[in-house]
Amino acid sequence: MALQGPIPVTFAMVFPYGCYIVGEVEPVKDFDASSSGRFVQARDKQTGELVWQVAVMDGDPTLKPAQKTVAVKILAPVQPVPPQPMPGLPFTPVEFDGMSVTPYVNGNGRLAYSIKVQQMHAPRQTAQPAKTGKDAA
């Protein structure tokens, strides 16, 4: 089979309704290398980059409450900085680039996905204002 390891995906495939940061960006603990009183940050097995994690809420209105919040792992040499909050919104919208998912069976025997990304940034403007009158020329 040609598919091995993380599966590349786009942001729109994973979060078609967008997503919002609902937690802090934190280092992920390497449970094998850490010991009592000694924290060792995890590194990605494929790239060797440090692994950070942030909780995000999926904007999909059809999801059940328990399905709305997911952890996104960010691979970066330094702690990523979230986009600035937007006035009037309770959560900060965010987008990710360089996304991949790795399917696995969780502790309940259900299919789950680990989401890894390379970059985090404020949402890009996708809609352009309609041109009218002399602007249309």
Image (cartoon, helix red, strand yellow):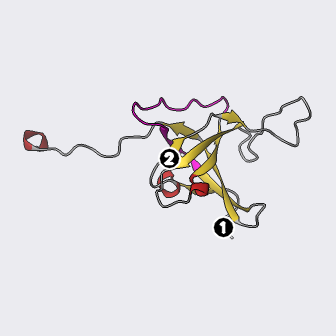
Q: In percent of the image, x 55 and y 56: which residue is there?
A: 9
Q: Position of residue 120 (x, y in %)?
A: 54, 38
Magenta-colored span? 77-99
Q: Check disc 2 and give the amino acid type.
A: Cys
Direction from residue 8 to residue 48 in the image, left or right? right
Q: Position of residue 14 (x, y in %)?
A: 53, 56
Mark 2 nearby-residue class (10 Å; few <14, some 14–19, many ≥20)? many
Label of residue 19 in the image: 2
Identity of the residue furthest to the right in this view? 36
Mark 1 sits on what residue? 2
Q: CA distance from mark 2 to mark 1?
A: 30 Å
Q: Check disc 1 and give the amino acid type.
A: Ala
Q: Position of residue 54 (x, y in %)?
A: 63, 40
* Vertical comparison of 17 with 108: above or below: above
- What is the secondary structure assignment of the residue under circle 2? strand
* Vertical comparison of 94 with 7: above or below: above
